[in-house]
Image (cartoon, grey):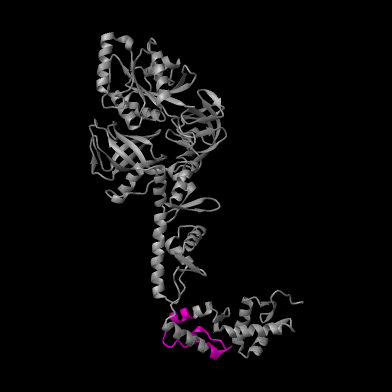
Amino acid sequence: MKHIIIGTAGHIDHGKTTLIRALTGRNTDRLKEEQQRGITIDLGFTWFDMKDGSRCGIIDVPGHEKFINNMVAGVVGMDLVLMVVAADEGIMPQTREHLDILELLGIKKTILVLNKCDLVDADWLEMMEDETRERLKGTIMENAPMVPVSAATGEGIDKLKDTIAEMIKDEVDARDVNSISRLPIDRVFSLSGIGTVITGTLLSGTITQNDDLMMYPVMKECHIRNIQVHGKDVDKCEAGQRVAINITNIKKEEIHRGCVIAPINNMENTRRIDVRLKVLKDSDRLIRNRERLHLFTGTSEVLCRAVLLDQEELSPGDEGLAQLLLEEDIVVKRGDRFVVRFYSPLETIGGGVVLESNPQKKKRFNEDSIDELRRKESGSLADICALNIKQHADTMITRSELSKLMAHSQEELIPYLEELVDQNIVLEYPMKKDIFYWHQDSAYQFQQDVTRALRDFQSTHPYRYGINKAEIHNQFLKHVKLNVFDDVIARMVEQDIFKLKNEYLQMSDFEINKDDRFQKIAKHLTDTFERSGYEMLRFSEIDKKGYSDEVVMDVLRVLIDEGTCVKAGVDLELYTMKHFMDDARDKITDFFRSNDVITIKDVKEMCGCSRKCAKPIVEYMDSIKLTKKVGAETERIKFGESKTN
């Protein structure tokens, strides 16, 4: 079912409020000052029913120049605008400014209401119709239907309702109720016995009674106690409806126009937005770099400076890419429209569309930044997902983080992310609590960087297995969680890009280069250990034959890994041939056939070595789970048995 919001626009005193009273039977001037002065200062809200029983919400916006900020807030969420022009005066300055604002905010559906027809004769009315048509050429209202009415007498009101019904039926699209709920707040007040009440037009999604949502940018959670649509309590409201919501947990004083209600952790405050900025062709002013402006978007009004990214200045009719630096936090979404007014004097000079709601700082005239923005401007939601994922090359980004960054629900993004994964544009790494995404380009760059590091390392250290995986993590992806990093490496190993030797990463085609130098050092080490027997040697006691300690140790590690040599001992590390330790293992096994406990002294005697070497032999047997220590430091029993056995 379509939920339709209709708004009014037009010059002060052209009869907008009277027209709404004629359509609805209710007066939208609710403030005492409005009723005394006869002008609309703030937003007024009401509704009326169509012949088919459908109900249309209607917003009365101010026409006076001083209240343009309220007018902009009122346009948020409108499906259709009635541009009201008095037949006795015609198009006036605020008519033109409202028309510019409607165009800048992307309003497409309009009806021209020529009001106060009872004050002019037929000839004058015909002349005014022709003149108005002429002056609207080249605007969004050039082809809008025109309906002459008299809000005071009721003449033409039925015709206006019929025109509205036709446009609603054929030209107004239904709102998206499946995306995240987003409600920009245009009014907040407190009622005795009820508490804080907010009003606004629900732009997307649904809000249900008892929901817990977040109030942005104040970042406070709130509970939905009660919902009203058109004055009636409801359990749920949907996109496109005017709503009044009673909330708890937040006081009236903590909320202001411009706040937004949305799901918890689904949007992100920002003080910087990337935009396509356009200057009105009829403006008397231009926008220079770092120009201070008033920004109006949603129901927010903040001061900002416009950093022009691809031009030195924007003249009337020009448009370009810019980054707006905001003086207060707001929340926006890609595709949101905005209006900018000159800082002083206040006049509407342009507007545009948000391209990125939480961008990184950009340098002016940087081709990469400009190209990225242009792709974001023209791309699909899948393209925008990919670009945002690519910006997190060093950290990756989770689905929940991406959802928050883009102000879309995860459910909205899932089909596009699946498409990117299927096309191998993006890689996904499912974890228990979330899914991490990484752009294929980032993965390829990581692969190239690691490959280069491994090639360099293996060239410098030909007798080592590779770089420790922890060191790779710290050097190249230190901001990525370790379990995700492990998954990255595991996949690249599966793809035969790298391989792991213990905890060392190496190229998939890597083998130890057992050249002549390696062979000579290896033979010297084995000959030395053979001569030493059980009188094992410290590394410092080995004659290196002129080779560096580093190279000799690299060769020794390979011999140990291959099972030719062993390292024994905890506090004192000694080296010998593996077969000596195998013989010692057999002797100790035989000893346990007739003894429950073996001592270091026993090992010393059976191996014919010094006590200095006997202790590391015992510690080696502990490490292979032949023995285990009990009681005294010098005593061991057979592993898996108790001393009492």
**Screen quadrant of the C terminus:** bottom right
| Numbered range of the magenta stretch | 529-555
- Name the residue nearer the viewer: 564 or 285: 564
Find residue 606 and report its horizontal and vertical position in percent.
66, 89
Residue 43 appears in the picture as rendered: no
Q: Is residue 297 left or right of residue 612?
A: left
Where does the image place residue 377, in percent across and percent down from the top left? 34, 42
Above-or-below relation of 630 to 433? below
Q: Quadrant of residue 640?
A: bottom right
Q: Is residue 309 left or right of residue 455?
A: left
The residue positioned farthest toward the right in the image shown:
645
Quarter of the image for residue 517 reads bottom left
Q: Find out whether residue 538 is within the magenta segment.
A: yes
Which residue is outermost to the top? 121
Residue 30: x and y in percent read 44, 20
Quarter occupied by residue 61: top left
Relative to 443, does residue 317 appear above or below in the rendering?
above
Kindly identify the residue that appears in the image at 38 percent across and 71 percent down.
456
Residue 431 seen anywhere in this rendered image of the structure = yes
Camera-side residue of 642 and 257 = 642
**Residue 432 location (% of width, % of height):** 56, 52
**Is 92 colored magenta in this rendering?**
no
Is residue 495 rendered to the left or right of residue 63?
Answer: right
Tag count: 0
Work out whether 593 lies above or below 142: below
